[in-house]
């Protein structure tokens, strides 16, 4: 069952009924001002940091679901009926409801008793504000008198404090209302120099800023007393809960259309120019007023929308493909690329599942996210890399997370996740391959943000590798620390006390438990760094790294192979995890996927065997589960992984993040059919038909789909902010379609399904447009390339030496 359809031409998903299984979200903003918005206008906005600068309130895990939003009410002033064109919060029966989620904007509308209304929400580029364009049309044969209300509830900035510290917060709320603009200025009197504002293009006939006045006592957003009565009360909030509500009057002749623009924004003043007149307590509005005036103008709003559209044309135009599979095309050309940008912007902070107050930017997560967006935003990738590296510790270790606003490592979680530093090498390698910007390696970057400790970025990469070498366990495999990629495999925690953190409680000295996964990652990262060193002419160093990876390979062969698949780890007792000897958790996806991705075991048949075992034991029709059999009880020596009921999350759920490792592994074995089949099993567009089971948005990946041990097998959770976005993008684009960045140029080595006659693609790479067409003549993966008609050796197309800006690449697969 579906709840809408894809409109690929307009790059939109069109939702046709409001009661989707879960709120289906979109993101507004792509620079500093952001919002999440659901298909019924739920969600919230923030400036840079979803915790510390939250503009509006949202009620997580509320009943009814998804409350707190950018709500419009219309009231027929004759019949006195009122409704919300976005369905929530009134949940009135509507006609022709649609929600169009597009690239950085959402349009929600419907009609009711002959009044049609659509609201377009978006954030203009380079501005810290959002625009709501509400278009109302009278489809009746008679004149209509309509009151329009727009409302939001302000958050008192720090979302954590806002949701907990009521004894203080009920006293601090302050607003100003001037020339019909509502200014939210809680705490502006003291240490803040920022405020929010909410304005309307029409002369208002009323406003409210005190929640109780707007809603009425014991009322909810579904039935505000003022809307029911048809008149706002011009209340001024003193403490309690400031809101912003505007009322406008629309007299509409039959067939007449009017548009009202609302602007919600964030503004900062220089600290010594906060007040006007100086010495007063009144906000200085000199610099904000022109901004407000500009965007309340409909033409300016339309022009800003056009700029946003062009922005996305540009970003998505960097890679476009046309294959025989509509789901591949749609995800690669539109939604997966879009999700990669959202994941880059948000990391794991703000979604329907991430409350915006929990996590900072993950070190490993952010480095992996680079794989998906670096081609669209290389300059921002560069900045992200340098920020991440600056939180690295002198030991080469890394804070597990850092806070986006301060860019400091997060002390609550600390470090000791032993895979973290290696991902920095993976991220930097992806950046170098994309951009060829070698200067980044010489960039001075501090350790732990200590000024004076600056070393070239390259030194950080060297220490990342050394960090693993300094932490080898009894078998010579890397020690796992608090956890490796699988945050929930906590082999040193041994937690038996409720409420303890599985990840940071440490009851063991960490000198025994080892990870085969980190060993595989080390091989991969070691080879990447060797490639980089070689490119810089550091031959001896490159060989040293290769030597180290070879040592690791030998250890993996001796202590990391279980006979039919790769082992996962050794626990604190030195016992195997992910072995046929285990009672549960006999085989894991991470070590098998990543070993084969890294090319381990290609020569001696282990890779093929590992992929075969993965298919046999872990693959399901909804994707590949983390491990089998699922843990049926809590294991003190394994930690959080066994805390989840079987089939969910890391306990044998389908973690979509790691499925691509197996897809890539299959391509390394030349198995295009298998790789694409795995790709399709979790491709959200390919799952659209089962939206009632899948439940999450059909246009973006979710972190997890419940595994076969779960009663809700096939149900997705935690959509949008997941490493899944980048890894799937990377797997399909760089390994299945095989259009792969390398230090030397663009490599073209597709491993596509046998049934595909070929495909075409356009790739903008280092300033050159590559028009690529691949034709299949035989069933294999042997590629013969011509560049502008001339045959070339091998599979790497070097950048044109003669300054050509467009080249034609033809590939024949046989
Ligand atoms: C979450 C974390 C990520 C981790 C994964 C597996 O996605 O953000 O860092 O690797 O879970 O536990
Ligand atoms: C929880 C989640 C895991 C995530 C981690 C982040 O353990 O289950 O997926 O990686 O939190 O800290």
Image: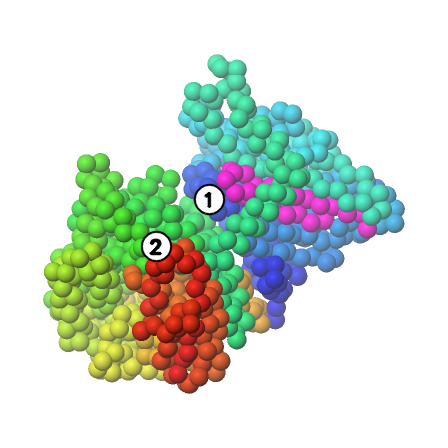
**Mark 2 vs ligand 1: CB below 8 Å:** no
Instruction: Kindly state the secondary structure of the residue where label 2 is placed.
Output: helix
x and y percentages locating residue 713 in the rendered image:
47, 73
Residue position marked by numbered label 1 in the rendering:
31
Q: What residue appears at the point 52 percent right and 22 percent down from the top-left corner?
A: 284
* Residue positioned 45% across, 38% down in the render: 53
**Residue drawn at (65%, 32%), measured in percent from left and top?**
208
Residue 37 seen in this snapshot: no
- Name, please, the residue furthest toward the right: 142
Tag 2: Cα neighbours inside 10 Å, few (<14), some, or many (≥20)?
A: many
Q: Which residue is mark 2?
A: 435
Q: Is residue 120 magenta?
A: yes
Instruction: Please say which color scheme the image uses.
Output: rainbow
Q: Is residue 196 above or below residue 285?
A: below
What segment carries the magenta color? 117-139
Whether residue 254 sits left or right of residue 592 in the image: it is right
Q: Nearer the viewer, residue 496 or 650?
A: 650
Percent coordinates x, y for residue 673 in the rendering:
42, 80
């Amino acid at each position: 069952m579906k709840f809408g359809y894809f409109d690929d031409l307009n790059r939109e998903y069109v939702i046709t009924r409001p009661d989707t299984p879960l709120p289906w979200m979109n993101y507004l903003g792509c620079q500093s001002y952001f919002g999440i918005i659901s298909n019924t206008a739920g969600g919230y906005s923030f400036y840079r940091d979803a915790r510390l600068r939250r503009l509006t309130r949202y009620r997580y895990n509320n009943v009814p679901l998804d409350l707190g939003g950018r709500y419009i009410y219309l009231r027929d002033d004759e019949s006195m009926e009122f409704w919300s064109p976005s369905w929530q919060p009134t949940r009135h029966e509507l006609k022709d409801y649609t929600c169009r989620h597009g690239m950085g904007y959402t349009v929600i509308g419907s009609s009711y008793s002959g009044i049609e209304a659509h609201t377009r929400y978006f954030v203009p580029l380079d501005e810290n504000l959002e625009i709501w364009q509400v278009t109302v049309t009278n489809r009746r044969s008679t004149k209509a008198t309509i009151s329009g209300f727009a409302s939001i509830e302000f958050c008192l900035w720090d979302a954590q404090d806002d949701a907990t510290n009521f004894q203080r917060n009920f006293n601090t709320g302050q607003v100003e209302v001037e020339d019909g603009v509502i200014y939210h200025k809680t705490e502006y009197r003291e240490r803040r120099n920022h405020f929010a504002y909410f304005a309307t293009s029409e002369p208002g006939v009323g406003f409210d800023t005190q929640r109780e006045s707007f809603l009425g006592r014991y009322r909810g957003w579904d039935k505000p007393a003022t809307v029911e009565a048809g008149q706002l009360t011009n209340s001024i909030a003193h403490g309690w809960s400031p809101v912003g509500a505007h009322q406008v009057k629309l007299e509409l002749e039959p067939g007449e259309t009017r548009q009202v623009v609302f602007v919600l924004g964030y503004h900062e003043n220089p600290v010594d120019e906060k007040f006007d007149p100086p010495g007063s307590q009144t906000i200085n509005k000199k610099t904000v007023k022109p901004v407000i005036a500009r965007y309340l103008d409909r033409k300016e709003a339309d022009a800003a929308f056009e700029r946003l559209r062009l922005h996305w044309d540009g970003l998505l135009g960097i890679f476009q493909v046309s294959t025989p599979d509509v789901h591949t095309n749609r995800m690669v050309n539109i939604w997966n690329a879009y999700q990669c940008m959202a994941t880059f912007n948000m990391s794991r902070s703000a979604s329907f599942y991430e409350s915006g107050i929990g996590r900072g930017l993950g070190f490993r997560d952010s480095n992996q996210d680079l794989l998906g967006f670096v081609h669209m935003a290389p300059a921002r990738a560069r900045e992200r890399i340098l920020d991440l590296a600056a939180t690295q510790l002198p030991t080469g270790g890394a804070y597990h997370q850092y806070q986006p606003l301060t860019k400091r490592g997060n002390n609550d979680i600390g470090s000791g996740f032993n895979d973290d530093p290696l991902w920095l090498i993976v991220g930097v390698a992806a950046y170098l391959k994309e951009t060829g910007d070698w200067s980044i390696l010489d960039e001075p970057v501090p350790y732990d943000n200590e000024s004076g400790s600056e070393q070239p970025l390259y030194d950080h990469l060297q220490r990342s590798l050394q960090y693993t070498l300094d932490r080898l366990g009894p078998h010579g495999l890397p020690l796992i620390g608090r956890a490796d990629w699988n945050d929930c495999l906590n082999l040193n925690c041994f937690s038996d006390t409720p409420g303890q953190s599985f990840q940071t409680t440490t009851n063991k000295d960490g000198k025994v438990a080892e990870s085969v996964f980190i060993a595989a990652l080390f091989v991969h990262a070691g080879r990447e760094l060797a490639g980089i060193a070689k490119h810089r002419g550091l031959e001896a160093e490159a060989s040293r790294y290769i030597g180290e990876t070879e040592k690791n390979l030998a250890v993996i062969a001796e202590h990391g192979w279980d006979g039919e698949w790769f082992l996962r780890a050794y626990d604190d007792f030195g016992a195997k995890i992910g072995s046929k000897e285990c009672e549960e958790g006999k085989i894991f996806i991470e070590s098998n996927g990543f070993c084969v991705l890294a090319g381990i075991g290609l020569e001696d048949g282990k890779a093929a065997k590992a992929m075969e075992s993965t298919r046999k034991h872990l693959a399901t029709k909804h994707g590949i589960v983390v491990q089998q059999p699922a843990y049926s009880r809590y294991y003190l020596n394994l930690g959080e992984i066994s805390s989840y009921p079987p089939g969910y999350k890391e306990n044998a759920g389908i973690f979509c993040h790691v499925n691509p490792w197996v897809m890539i592994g299959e391509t390394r074995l030349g198995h295009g059919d298998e790789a694409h089949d795995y790709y399709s099993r979790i491709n959200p567009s390919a799952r659209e038909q089962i939206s009632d089971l899948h439940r999450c948005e059909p246009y973006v990946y979710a972190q997890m789909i419940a595994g076969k041990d779960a009663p809700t097998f096939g149900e997705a959770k935690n959509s949008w902010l997941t490493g899944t976005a980048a890894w799937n993008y990377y797997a399909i684009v760089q390994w299945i379609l095989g259009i792969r960045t390398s230090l030397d140029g663009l490599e073209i080595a597709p491993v596509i399904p046998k049934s595909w006659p070929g495909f075409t693609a356009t790739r903008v790479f280092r300033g050159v447009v590559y028009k690529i067409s691949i034709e299949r003549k035989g069933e294999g993966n042997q590629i013969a390339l011509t560049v502008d008609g001339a045959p070339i050796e091998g599979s790497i197309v070097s950048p044109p030496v003669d300054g050509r800006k467009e080249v034609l690449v033809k590939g024949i697969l046989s």
